[in-house]
Amino acid sequence: MEADENTSYPDPAAYYADGPATLPNNVGGHEGVYEPDEVMDGITRACSWLQSLISGIEARRRKDRCVETECYNVHKARLETVKTLLMRKLDYEVAARQAYEQKLTSTLEQRLGGMEATLMLRITELDKAGSGLIEIADTHHEQAAVVHIDSFGRIFERVHADEPAESHSRG
């Protein structure tokens, strides 16, 4: 179902001010069918919330027939905004964050053959059982091999993963 030009998408900040810590599956009641391009495929397949945001841009692009460069800039600006909001949700200490970043970066480099990840989003899902992580990464024109798993052991997706999923769950 394509979005029309009057479809509005809520500000992602609304979900992070005093709202729920988890991401909604259906932002603003929109359930779009996303036709991925090469650069965004790994990101949108990994997170339905981002997919919902981007599918609205895609629908407008098909309708308006704007040039590729303009649409890429819209994608980039929207993803940078979401990335900033998600990073604000990380509430663990700096030392732990740095250790985790080093481990994740090393894992990504091994799986990608040394390629540098150009985009990495991290979501902290807070609940009574503890926190879980979803890692999303994308490389220039290639999808990263990243495991997505939360504190309940649910696997969201593995994009081109060469290894079994590793759980970040406690207990």
Image (cartoon, rainbow, N blue to C red):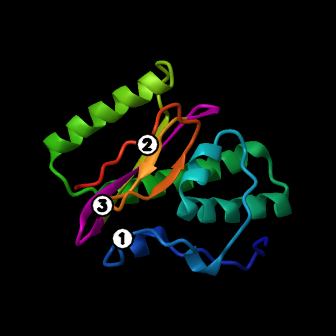
Mark 2 or mark 1: which is in front? 2
Q: The N terminus lies in which quarter of the figure?
A: bottom right
Residue contact at pointers 3 and 2, CB within 8 angstroms: no
**Dot 3 corresponds to which residue?**
89
Q: The C terminus lies in which quarter of the figure?
A: bottom left
Kindly tell me whether residue 40 is visible in this rendering. no
Residue contact at pointers 2 and 1, CB within 8 angstroms: no
Is residue 136 in the magenta section?
yes
Judging from the image, what secondary structure is the residue with disc 2 in? loop
Question: Looking at the picture, which amino acid does disc 2 mark?
Answer: Ala
Kindly tell me whether residue 126 is visible in this rendering. yes
Query: Residue 54, image x and y in percent?
Result: 64, 59
Tell which circle, 1 or 3, labels the residue nearer the N-terminal end.
1
**Dot 2 corresponds to which residue?**
165
Residue contact at pointers 1 and 3, CB within 8 angstroms: yes
**Residue at (58%, 74%) from the top-left corner?**
26
Instruction: Please state the total of marks drawn on the protein image.
Output: 3
* Mark 3 surroundings: few (<14), some (14-19) or many (≥20) residues within 10 A: some
Question: Looking at the picture, which amino acid does disc 1 mark?
Answer: Tyr
**Dot 1 corresponds to which residue?**
16
Q: Which residues are magenta?
A: 126-143
Real-space Cα distance between discs 3 and 2?
24 Å
Real-space Cα distance between discs 1 and 3?
7 Å
Judging from the image, what secondary structure is the residue with disc 3 in? loop
Q: Main secondary structure of the magenta part?
A: strand
In this view of the protein, which residue sits in the foreground, 171 or 151? 171
